[in-house]
Amino acid sequence: MFISTDGAGSEVVGLQWGDLNWEERTLLVQRSVVHGRVGDTKTEASRIPLPVDPRLGDALLEQRYRSMHREPSDWVFANRIGKPRWQESILQRQIKPAALRAGIGKIGWHTFRHSYSSLLRRVGADIKVQQELLRHSTIQSTMNVYTQAMSEGKRAANSVVVRSVLPFETCGGVTAA
């Protein structure tokens, strides 16, 4: 859920069932929750509908069906008494141990945002699409802060440029693939 919705932990734990539009397969982030306190999202750009992948939608519907808290005003990630879970608790109890078991190592909420941004870039998503999915107010935020090129992407781009500029013999007689 966190990576497919851009990974803003405070906003994910701030989701209520009514924020999901099941017919349109979208969710609208309308609030954040930090240390149990409900607040606004960071920017106006944060409040645009996000697409919900059908598989994620199915998993959420299954979770809603199993939950004791199913009303539109109930929290998607509610604790036993119906309050929103603390993002720090989710990170410490579930995410960090899972990352260690998977051999990922150190992980935090921004890891999801950076990974999501880099993966969007890797699959060739248009920069405007990346900006909107990450809900940034400016393209500069998307490009300068969150998106990091994958090393194999850097290598491939560099090779294309070098091979287009240098003569065949200079490149060691290796032809471009």
Image: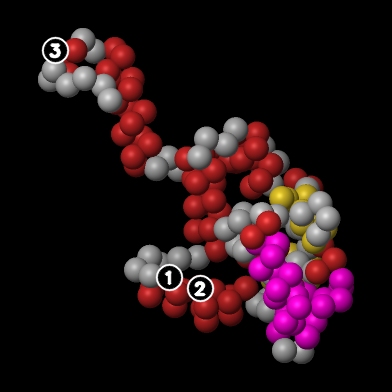
Residue 92: % across, % down: 51, 78
- The residue to which callout 3 is attached is 169
Q: Nearer the viewer, residue 3 or 143?
A: 3
Residue 76, given in percent of the width and then of the height, sits at 74, 73
Q: Left or right: 86 with respect to 67?
A: left
Which label number is shown at residue 131?
none
Work out which quarter of the rendered image holds the C terminus and state it: top left
Q: Secondary structure at mark 2?
A: helix
Residue picked out by circle 1: 99
Dot 2 and dot 1 residues touching (CB under 8 Å): yes
Vertical placement of 87 versus 41: above or below?
below
Q: Which mark is residue 95?
A: 2
Quadrant location of residue 90? bottom right
Question: In the image, what residue type sits under mark 1?
Answer: Ala
Q: Secondary structure at mark 3?
A: helix
Mark pair 3, 1: CA separation: 46 Å
Q: Quadrant of residue 109?
A: bottom right
